[in-house]
Amino acid sequence: MDSIGLPSFELLTTIKYDHQQKTIPLLKYHLNRLKKTHEELSIKLPNSWCSKEDACSSEIIENEIKSKANGNLSLRIRLTIGPNHHIQIVSSPLPQLPISHDGTLPIIVIDNQSTKYNNNPFLLYKTTNRTIYDNIRRRHNINSNNDNILKPFDVLMYNEFNQITETTISNIGLRTKGSINEPFITPKSSCGLLPGIQRDILLKDGVIIEGIITLHQLVSEDWEMICFNALRGLYHVQLLIK
């Protein structure tokens, strides 16, 4: 916490480096989102450092990213920007989804309590203040290094109105099984969620459409589910309903 009671935070984005193509997919989207996040938080958190500083130059950020995006492995690049335009980059091998030779998909479980969004800026914009997400994962004994296909990979969240929102690391899409010609439904932004880069792209491409799915609907019907984010792209998962 800082002197005015705000939790400390930095802007955050997680980027993929594709070693085969020698490219950084969606780089411009990441740069634009960082700038937008700074601008939005300067308004929503008027006592924060974002309101006291201009956004860091996109050119400087891009050069920093490109200096780390190299080598013979695809990388997960975690970039943070803090006060005084302090940029920190940590790269690691791109994590793989839990793999099964029999076609078993990564397991998503439903959280056992609702998340109160209440226009919480740390649930609407990507920052290093991920306490709520971390607590949800901890409740379900999920860690970032889970490669066991038999254990839950992620947790599906919902708001206080029992409307489905997102998982702890991705946006989602749902459609009833058998509706292969229909687009997936992704929760509306008004439900309270962090709208990611990949979500914006899939909306523009018509792969997903916005809608509202309640917890009651979720447990009453048989659904096909996808998750998506800028790091992993789109991937299919299995929803475990107890």
Image (spheres, rainbow, N blue to C red):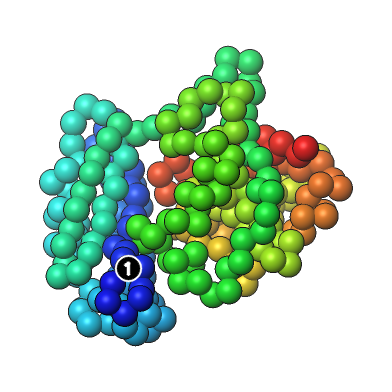
In the rendered image, residue 97, in percent from the top left (x then y), is placed at 49, 30
Nearer-the-camera pick, 137 or 239: 137
Q: Residues within 10 Å of mark 1 (few under 14, many from 20)?
A: few
Identify the residue shown where x is 76% and y is 43%: 223
Res. 119 in view = yes
Q: Which residue has dot 1 on it?
A: 1
Q: Which image quarter: residue 104? A: top right
Can you say whether 10 is above or below 92 in the image?
below
Q: Is residue 175 left or right of residue 124?
A: right
Disc 1 residue type (three-letter): Met
Can you say whether 109 is above or below 128 in the image?
above
In the rendered image, residue 139, in percent from the top left (x then y), is placed at 57, 43
Identify the residue shown where x is 27% and y is 35%: 92
The residue most toward the top is 101
Q: Is residue 193 left or right of residue 80?
A: right
Quadrant for the C terminus, please. top right
In the rendered image, residue 187, in percent from the top left (x then y), is placed at 65, 61
In the rendered image, residue 48, in percent from the top left (x then y), is placed at 30, 78
The residue most toward the right is 220
Nearer-the-camera pick, 80 or 34: 80
Nearer-the-camera pick, 66 or 138: 138
Can you say whether 43 is above or below 127 in the image?
below
Identify the residue shown where x is 20% and y is 79%: 53
Identify the residue shown where x is 66% and y is 63%: 159
Q: Is residue 203 left or right of residue 164?
A: left
Regarding mark 1 in the picture, which secondary structure is present there?
Answer: loop
Quadrant for the N terminus, please. bottom left
Q: Is residue 172 left or right of residue 231?
A: right
Numbered disc total: 1
Res. 36 in view = no
